Image: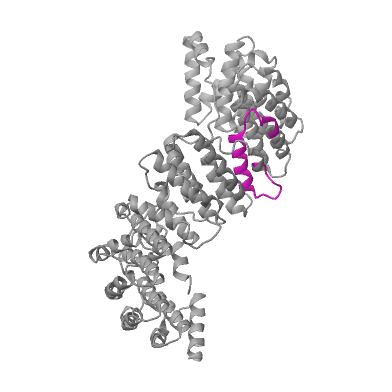
Amino acid sequence: PDRRKDAVKKVIAAMTVGKDVSALFPDVLNCMQTASMELKKLVYLYLINYAKTNPDMAILAVNTFRRDANDPNPLIRALAIRTMGCIRVDKITEYLCDPLRRALKDDDPYVRKTAAICVAKLYDISPTLAEEQGFVELLQELVSDSNPVVVSNAVAALSELASLGNPRVFTITPSTLSKLLAAISECQEWGQVYILDALANYSPKNAREAESIVERITPRLQHSNCAVVMGAVRVIVKFVDLIDNEETVKVLSRKMSPPLITLLSAEPEIQYIALRNINLIVQKHPTILSHEIRVFFCRYNDPIYVKMEKLELMVLLCSERNAEQVLLELKEYATEVDVDFVRKAVRAIGRIAIKLERSAEKCINVLLELIKTRVNYVVQESIIVIKDIFRRYPNRYESIIATLCENLDSLDEPEAKASMVWIVGEYASRIDNADDLLETFLDNFQDETAEVQLQLLTATVKLFLKRPEGSKELMENVLSLATEHSDNPDLRDRGYIYWRLLCTDPEAAKRIVLSDKPVITDDSSQLDGPLLNELITNISTLASIYHKPPDAFVKRSRIPLGATADDDDDDSDDDDSDDGDDSSEDGEGSSAKAKGAAANSSSSSSSNADTIDD
């Protein structure tokens, strides 16, 4: 037996590194008749991988499977059921029904919880067979099982069935609700995740029921597993809107803050996922972390993707009370070595100025100090945000234009050039040498980007309308360049429009070109209400990381049993053609779970359920 075990181990090792050992199928199959649990597991693992390529040989293992499914040892019974469920061969699937039905009613909870996951695998292979044989109803009965681990696996399996296109298969009733709430504190952590997900899809009847559920869920916020914490936050954030007691809402907000902050002490990957979720929560409930802005200050060793997310949250949480503190921090960031981070920090200063009117002057002063550093990309980014500040607060901070004009020669980025040209054109009446400044850009008009050319055209027309004397020749030169020497249709059209307006009705041109501009606001980080509400219900999933609804990036297609990737059309690229059962084995459906804040663990409820106690 030991020699046989060593031989099979070598076969499994070769299989693991990608070598084709399917030729040994008959020899490995002969090793099934053994009392050794370790050898039996190895043989079953081999069968799962190669049964599809040898379906006629695999059928010879059915008698052993059926015998093992009646073994006195519950571990062997569960192993046989799990292996039969993993083998996607139609002939074996036919023989799975009777052992699976017995396993769902087995006296041992380990066998029942394994059988629950096996139902999801069978449903993925043949939904019709699973429904005709009554396995869905048997699975629904397991939600009321006395063992919390069985309950959690039943919930995981039913959630998978719902994601496979049958959402009505799992409906939480009052009796089911009480069972789930009772089981959540006793089952393993990944079982808690699935129960929390199920509760998040439940709609309480009234405020009292919502408050009762939240009260039972709140202790999960103290869990060591990030997935459980985020699952609890998801339920609470969704149900808190239904609670009409303001004092209760305040208490819940205070209770959610520490766990969310704790997530920022984890690995960078988990920090990033936590920050993306916190971004949604803060947009929905700004008061939750309003006093905790310091925890979002960047550390020197944070990865760039974490720093960028922290900057977003600093802008979201910035208020008149903490603006000075935030600006000091952003000013420090603007002296860092990472160019992208510096640019984002300077932009954040501008966004705060637009957001907080009383702090705008402080922001302007910080930007002027940064311009004095003469660091090229800092100067250019500062001019871009100052242009937005001028649009937000017209005729208020024009005194700094002279400082901006001093840096004209250092501008080489299209957006910075366009911003500076806009400022010169908008305040042409207050800049004595506006025509000279615009002429410096006109020397290379044909080589500029469309963005700069369009701004130059508009700024020159503005200059002519405000100061006709001395700028007519410049304006005609620009109009000629735009209409006669440009291949850009947008530039030509705008040039012709200006030309005709000026020729036919200069007063109308003045009313149109020099009209009051709408005041801008900073909504760059704000999501639309309906989209935000949908993403809030998908907290702790990939949707909350992408900030897109699941339908935008998840597509599921069913692959017929026995089909290969080549048989399926291009749409099947979203699934694994040969391992389509993996999604159900892992308990993950089209909701695309980011389980456990993704980086915390690659395991999931059912895979843990399959391996625990083995």
Q: Which residues are magenta?
A: 296-325
x%, y% of residue 364? 69, 26
Q: Is residue 72 visible?
A: yes
What is the x, y in percent for residue 499? Answer: 50, 17
Does the magenta run of residues contain 313?
Answer: yes
Whether residue 570 appears in this view of the structure is no
Q: Is residue 190 left or right of residue 131?
A: right
Type of colouring: one colour
Q: Is residue 265 left or right of residue 62?
A: right
Q: Nearer the viewer, residue 278 or 568?
A: 278
* Residue 386 placement, left or right of 374: left
Is 371 positioned to the left or the right of 1 in the image?
right
Q: Residue drawn 73% across and 23% down?
A: 403
The secondary structure that most of the magenta stretch takes on is: helix
Residue 392 placement (x, y as % from top left): 58, 22
Identify which residue, 315 or 286, lies in the foreground: 286
Query: Considering only vertical position in the picture, is 332 above or below 83?
Result: above
Q: Is residue 93 above or below residue 230?
A: below
Tell me which residue sits at (44%, 69%) in the image. 610
Membership of 380 in magenta stretch: no
Residue 34 lies, in percent from the top left, at 42, 88
